[in-house]
Image (cartoon, rainbow, N blue to C red):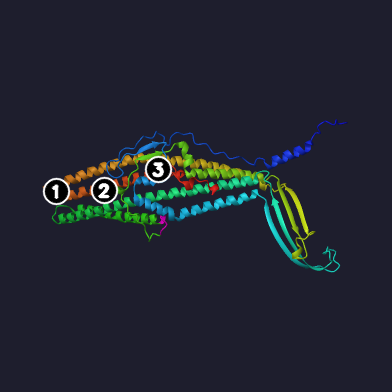
Amino acid sequence: MVVPPNARTPRPRASCVVAALATLLIAGCAAGPDFKTPPAPHVDRYTAKPLAAATASGGSGAAGGVQHFDAAGDVTADWWTLFHSAALDRLIRQALAHNPDLKAAQAALKAAHEDVLAQRGSYYPSVSASLSGSREKDPAGALAPVPSNNAYLYNLFTPQVSVSYTPDVFGLNRRSVESLKAQEQAVRFQMIAAYNTLTANVVVTAIQIASLQAQIDATRKLVDLNRHMLTILHYQLTGGLVSQQDVAAQQAQLAQAESALPDLVKQLSQQRNRMAVLAGRFPSQGVDADFTLASLHLPEQLPVSLPSKLVAQRPDIRQAQANLHAASAQVGVAAANRLPQIQLSADAGSTALAISKVFSPGTGFWNLTTSITAPIFEGGTLMHQERAAKANYTQAAAQYRSTVLSAFEDVADTLTALEQDAKGLQAAATAADAAKTSLDIAQRQVKDGYAAPLSLLNAEQAWQQAQISLVQAQANRYADSAALFQALGGGWWHRKDSTRDTHEK
């Protein structure tokens, strides 16, 4: 067939197809599923019943104010400052600077970040250089090649550069890096959780120290009162005014009051030791941890984050989400391992009999190699590894849902506790006021001669017992307020060191 001179010559279609296929292979999609962030739960509140706008009043005095729930409120990064305690702020700064658990979590994050950077190296060619030198002696008349000068004893020097590259055709490297990035994020949120736990533990420990010290003081007064009452009963027994049974009953009451004291002292010592360890110190070194409940301010405004935001705020949920992401990427890694792998390599160098001639003309060599390796039979290993990766993803998905449910349960329990704490403190305050009124009446009656001193001691004993219950109710309200801030995520998203993307470090 004659082609007209002005006709356009058709391009070979085969080359176009090959080029297109090569482009698709190099920039193709990675094997395995693309991870999608789980949606937020479709719930509009934490508790079964709608949350009240505010708690009941706990009465006057420490922890007696009304607490208002700020719907859709935000948690500040330094929420503990709402307790208005300089001593507490100082201890938290010490703990954040010296706590070994937090330092270990920070080191783990750095290691995870370096693992990501190390895996990213698989995106680039690998280049290595070598220099070998040898002295050889070949037998006379050997069939093997000898140098051009036919010497049988000679030196051989070979400098060489080798380059190898594995194109990420099916996304094996990309999925591996993706998995490590997700693991880094999991470690990051584990570190944030350690930070939140540490600060909450310092606050709660301080509250417990204040509560236990107040209970010890009241219990010691109870012991003194019971001893005084026992002395009076012994005196009345000699006069025949009371029976031996009355004396025995008072002895039992004194022993009961005394038995409560060692346990309280033990708990106080343990809490002081705990505070020292939280601050990164030995128990024998101690810390300045003398607190009173009256020195703490009860937070009056309590934020209650929207349920849809909790999954983004709780570090344990974010850690579970990162674990789910890593498991998803591992499915892609397992799938890519079942596909062919392409290896490109090149070597270039020089060989000479003298080190001074290694770069002389005629001594150079080079070679290019391309290889494709595809698994054909592995005894089912790769197939079962992919199935195991999918099962691990299913497990991670279930663990993620469990973590979300536990987080919502945690917030719901804390909100309920805060509502009931106020009622409990109100009842304890009412009982304490009634006991104080009874004590005042008994004091006037004894002064006017209308009652025996023993009735006054009974009234004092009832008042001290009411004081112990009041202290416990106050401590519960402080502690549950701190628990709410931790349950809502601790405000880490307002800290620059936590919000900065670790991949940019």
Which span is picked out in magenta? 277-281
Mark 1 and 3 residues: CB-CB less than 8 Å, in contact? no
Mark 2 and 1 residues: CB-CB less than 8 Å, in contact? no
Q: From mark 2 to mark 1, how far is it between C-alphas?
A: 21 Å
Where disc 3 sits, the SS reads: helix
First of labels 3, 2 by sequence position:
2
Most foreground residue, 428 or 328: 328
Q: Amino acid at mark 1?
A: Val
Most foreground residue, 411 or 263: 411
First of labels 2, 1 by sequence position:
1
Residue 259 x, y percent position in the rendering: 29, 55
Q: Residues within 10 Å of mark 3 (few under 14, many from 20)?
A: many
Q: Which residue is mark 2?
A: 465
> Which of the 4 image quarters holds residue 28?
top right
Q: Which residue is mark 3?
A: 484
Q: Residue at x 43, y 52 (%)?
A: 96
Secondary structure, magenta segment, majority class: loop
Residue 352 x, y percent position in the rendering: 77, 63
Q: Amino acid at mark 3?
A: Leu
Where disc 2 sits, the SS reads: helix
Q: Residue at x 73, y 52 (%)?
A: 346
Q: Residue at x 30, y 49 (%)?
A: 295
Residue 78 visible in the shown view: yes
Q: Mark number for residue 446?
A: 1
Describe residue 461's horizontal placement relative to residue 375 as left or right: left
Where disc 1 sits, the SS reads: helix
Residue 37 x, y percent position in the rendering: 54, 39
Q: From mark 3 to mark 2, how far is it between C-alphas?
A: 29 Å
> Which of the 4 image quarters holds residue 2?
top right
Residue 354 x, y percent position in the rendering: 76, 65
Q: Quadrant of the N terminus?
A: top right
